[in-house]
């Protein structure tokens, strides 16, 4: 690209319950830029396209290498991490919007607490006797590890639920990420000791039944986690539990 | 007594390990974190965690791990702590395994181990190439369990500003700021643990995350805590250049057989795959036949610097070399290194399974940090019940993980950081609980005037920051500071330039007063926080630069060519043990060793006499005073390092 400048259209909002507004920034083009390096440039010189000095844009980021999940936003209409959004691969003007499924904190920063609460609901942990020396864990075969590792790469970034038609700000759907974590812990040798508790929460209101099978989640997952497979698997486990409980077997 | 609790600041591996261990003993914890803890910088650790489990039957043992660690750190590590850590490492790996970390497995289903720098053994347990992320998640899950049980209260989007101290200087709480509302409040805590990581952002672009400004530890230093070994900054040999960040390319790439090379001909413009083997210079393998590409990081970074700067052989004339994995199958690479190769591909657009990667050295880790104490046992281990363990020079204030300073000496070995973070968090737990239980009075019962005062001081400071209407954009000033640090306090250090840097930082300190707080709004405004962080980064830069200026030797990551004592190529490090023994017995003769060996050992011994000490910075109201403290080297006698 031979553009000398990069144009951003950013959907800004001064705080929760405040009106949102678009602001345009035009900044000099530098090679190897990504959305975050550009936001940093704006921070150093916060002047909008009308030449007016404005407050620097607020966004969240941390690792800048797509493992922490912090910097998710909607870029040119697509939900993704802004650190790995390379300018050379984006059409201009580049639009930046906050995730729509979560309350906006300010500008591009949103509150994803709901996703972490969902992890509590599905008891996404291995129960343990203590943190003292109790020797090694169970033997686990490489294939099993391969499946677990993939699921364990979920960074709670919010892409899957942003793209999900069933997940909305006024319902309590757990979302694909949490369902997939329930699968991860239900397959662990000691994690499965509380498998039924996880299944019960998945069978509760806002659980697995709320999934509409749109399959958008798996399309947008930046870590290519087989989310629909996880949902199907947890659906199977839940049905099994349902029938078992019904007939008390 | 009213209910007591610990405050843990930082939700990375060290903070979470401490939280878990303290909660396990029934003690309440207030966990304060800048971000949701699951997003902490520990996620960036890639390659693995060390522990001498000897799964490959190579005769590995915790004692050899201990030796490698101490030697890797050029003997500046505190040996009882290093020893205790290495002996606990296998147990820590088993613990993580029980917690559900999806470690890679052998065909039999055992934990798999790979090689890493500075050792000849397969000692690194790993979970693909995102081990830090996997460990952090496992600890996060355990802490979430305690949260549900009510023992842990977690407050995220809060930044630690400073310690609350009683009239005797004892730490009885922490002043924290809500990063959304901007509100500043003092929280009562019977002990406060800083597990706030390293200060890579001082250098602007590094392999560190955005939150790694070192602000919390610097705040402790500004409140009077001693700061140790600040000048020892690890430069990782292999990172991927970027405008916003220098992304790490894990040492595990070399652990799995990755080879570092440059074309033998300067500025060779050919496609690297077109260059035949005999026209490639595998400079690490050539110079270090035993350790090859897996020399420790300080050695690797220096050699790359030498090849690119002194010999002018960098790829396309730049400060870059090839890191080549293309001799492995895609399937092998995806299984063992998938995460990092995806990152490389995503950010550069080049597939490292098909093309050699272009990499260069970048600031990565701080071996230094807040000074902390410990209690050793007679046999050289640590008394885990001691409240002194990990306590800073401010009573009741503790530090753990990268924030502390004693484990890695002058250079950290790869895959020892995840270990030291989790080890310190777990190890200190019982001592912290003992300390809290031994208090005559709970922090909750102390007069509120103490906390009101601390809170008010910080509120006034931030009111002042918000009123700053000077000419300097804080982000630009930071860019200048980091440029200065990057150009002058990096791999190769020189006294004239360091002296100029120390002066330059004083200028930044002055210019900071003329900063404009470019956003003065009240809601979720990161600017006042950044202005405060910038102030602390300037103060910490002084510690790093002055420490480097004063230390006239070459040790680990601190390389001053002027003071390098050239080791004869046929020298064996064990000779030095014999030399000291003979010298002590009065039996050293002119012909006991070859003359050049004798001269080398004399100089090495003298230099150690003077410099094998921790540098300790204390804040004098304007900048650091530097003094030196002895290091416990009673378990392994220091000797010259050799890796070829």
Image (spheres, rainbow, N blue to C red):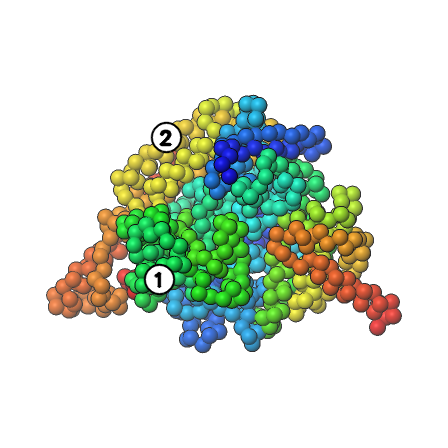
On the picture, is A204 further left or further right than B463?
right
Residue A74 x, y percent position in the rendering: 64, 41
In what quadrant of the picture does the C terminus of chain B appear?
bottom left
Determine the chain carrying the residue at label 1. Answer: B
The kind of secondary structure element at disc 1 is: loop
Alpha-carbon span between mark 2 and mark 1: 51 Å
Residue A146 x, y percent position in the rendering: 60, 66
Q: Is residue B524 above or below residue B132?
A: above
| Residue on which disc 1 sits | B276
| Residue on which disc 2 sits | B507
Quarter of the image where one finds residue A238: bottom right
The kind of secondary structure element at disc 2 is: helix
Residues packed near mark 1 inside 10 Å, few (<14), some (14 to 19) or many (20 plus): few
Instruction: Give the total number of marks visible in the rendering.
Output: 2
Query: Residue A92 versus residue B496: which sits nearer the camera?
Result: A92
Kindly identify the residue that appears in the image at 87 percent across and 70 percent down. Answer: A247
């Amino acid at each position: 690209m031979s553009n000398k400048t990069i144009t951003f259209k950013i959907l800004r909002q001064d705080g929760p319950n405040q009106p949102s507004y678009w602001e345009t920034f035009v900044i000099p083009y530098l090679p190897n830029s990504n959305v975050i390096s550009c936001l940093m440039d704006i921070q150093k010189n916060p002047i909008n396209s009308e030449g007016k000095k404005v407050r620097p844009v607020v966004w969240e980021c941390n690792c800048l290498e797509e493992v922490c999940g912090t910097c998710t936003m909607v870029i040119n209409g697509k939900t993704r991490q802004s650190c790995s959004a390379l300018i050379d691969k984006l059409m201009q003007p580049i639009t930046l919007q906050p995730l729509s499924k979560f309350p906006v904190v300010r500008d591009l920063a949103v509150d994803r607490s709901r996703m972490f609460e969902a992890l509590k609901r599905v008891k996404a942990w291995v129960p343990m006797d203590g943190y003292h020396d109790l020797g090694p864990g169970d033997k686990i075969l490489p294939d099993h590890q391969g499946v677990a590792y993939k699921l364990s790469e979920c960074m709670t970034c919010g892409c899957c639920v942003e793209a999900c038609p069933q997940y909305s700000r006024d319902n309590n759907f757990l979302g694909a990420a949490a369902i997939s974590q329930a699968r991860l812990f239900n397959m662990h040798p000691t994690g499965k000791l509380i498998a039924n508790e996880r299944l019960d929460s998945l069978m509760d209101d806002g659980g697995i039944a709320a999934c509409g099978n749109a399959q958008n989640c798996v399309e947008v997952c930046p870590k290519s986690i087989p989310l629909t497979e996880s949902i199907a698997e947890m659906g199977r486990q839940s049905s099994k539990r349902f029938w078992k409980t019904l007939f008390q077997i | 007594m009213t209910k007591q609790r610990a405050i843990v600041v930082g939700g990375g591996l060290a903070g979470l390990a401490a939280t878990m261990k303290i909660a396990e003993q029934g003690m309440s914890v207030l966990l304060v974190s800048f971000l949701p803890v699951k997003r902490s910088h520990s996620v960036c650790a890639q390659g693995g965690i060390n522990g001498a489990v000897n799964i490959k039957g190579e005769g590995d043992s915790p004692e050899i791990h201990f030796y490698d660690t101490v030697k890797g750190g050029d003997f500046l590590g505190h040996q009882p702590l290093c020893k205790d850590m290495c002996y606990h490492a296998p147990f820590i790996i088993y613990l993580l395994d029980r917690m559900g970390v999806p470690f890679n497995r052998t065909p039999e289903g055992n934990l798999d181990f790979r090689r890493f720098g500075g050792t000849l053994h397969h000692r690194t347990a790993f979970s693909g190439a995102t081990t830090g992320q996997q460990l952090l998640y496992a600890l996060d899950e355990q802490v979430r369990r305690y949260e549900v049980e009510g023992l842990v209260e977690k407050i995220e989007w809060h930044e630690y500003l400073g310690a609350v101290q009683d009239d005797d200087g004892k730490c009885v709480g922490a002043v924290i700021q809500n990063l959304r509302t901007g509100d500043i409040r003092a929280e009562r805590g019977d002990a406060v643990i800083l597990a706030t990581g390293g200060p890579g952002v001082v250098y602007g672009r590094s392999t560190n995350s955005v939150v790694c400004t070192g602000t919390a530890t610097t705040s402790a230093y500004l409140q009077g805590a001693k700061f140790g070994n600040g000048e020892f900054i690890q430069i990782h040999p292999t990172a991927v250049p970027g405008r916003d960040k220098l992304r790490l390319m894990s040492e595990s790439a070399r652990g799995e057989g990755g080879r570092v090379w440059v074309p033998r001909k300067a500025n060779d413009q050919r496609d690297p795959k077109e260059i035949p083997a005999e026209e490639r210079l595998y400079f690490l393998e050539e110079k270090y036949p035993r350790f090859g590409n897996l020399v420790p990081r300080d050695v690797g970074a220096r050699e790359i610097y030498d090849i690119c700067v002194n010999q002018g052989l960098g790829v396309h004339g730049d400060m870059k070399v090839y890191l080549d994995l293309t001799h492995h199958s895609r399937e092998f690479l995806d299984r063992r290194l998938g995460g990092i190769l995806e990152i490389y591909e995503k950010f550069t657009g080049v597939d490292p399974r098909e093309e050699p990667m272009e990499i260069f050295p970048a600031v990565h880790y701080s071996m230094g940090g807040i000074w902390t104490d410990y209690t050793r046992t007679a046999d050289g281990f640590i008394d885990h019940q001691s409240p002194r363990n990990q306590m800073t020079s401010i009573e009741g204030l503790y530090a753990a993980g990268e924030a502390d300073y004693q484990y890695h000496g002058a250079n950290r070995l790869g895959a020892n950081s995840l270990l030291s973070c989790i080890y310190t968090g777990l190890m200190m737990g019982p001592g912290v609980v003992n300390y809290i239980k031994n208090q005559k009075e709970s922090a909750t019962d102390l007069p509120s005037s103490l906390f009101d005062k601390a809170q008010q001081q910080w509120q006034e400071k931030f009111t002042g920051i918000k009123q700053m209407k000077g000419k300097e954009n804080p982000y630009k000033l930071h860019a200048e500071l980091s440029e200065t640090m990057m150009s002058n306090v990096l791999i190769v250090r020189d006294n004239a330039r360091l002296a100029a840097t120390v002066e330059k930082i004083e200028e930044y300190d002055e210019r900071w007063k003329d900063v404009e707080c470019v956003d003065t709004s009240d809601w979720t405004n990161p600017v006042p926080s950044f202005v405060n962080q910038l102030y602390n980064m300037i103060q910490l830069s002084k510690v790093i630069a002055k420490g480097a200026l004063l230390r006239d030797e070459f040790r680990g990551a601190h390389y001053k060519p002027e003071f390098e004592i050239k080791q004869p190529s046929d020298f064996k490090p064990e000779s030095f043990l014999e030399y000291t023994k003979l010298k002590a017995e009065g039996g050293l003769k002119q012909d006991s060793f070859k003359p050049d060996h004798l001269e080398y050992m004399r100089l090495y011994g003298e230099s150690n006499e003077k410099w094998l000490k921790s540098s300790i910075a204390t804040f004098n109201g304007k900048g650091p005073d530097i003094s030196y403290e002895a290091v416990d080297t009673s378990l392994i006698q220091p000797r010259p390092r050799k890796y070829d």
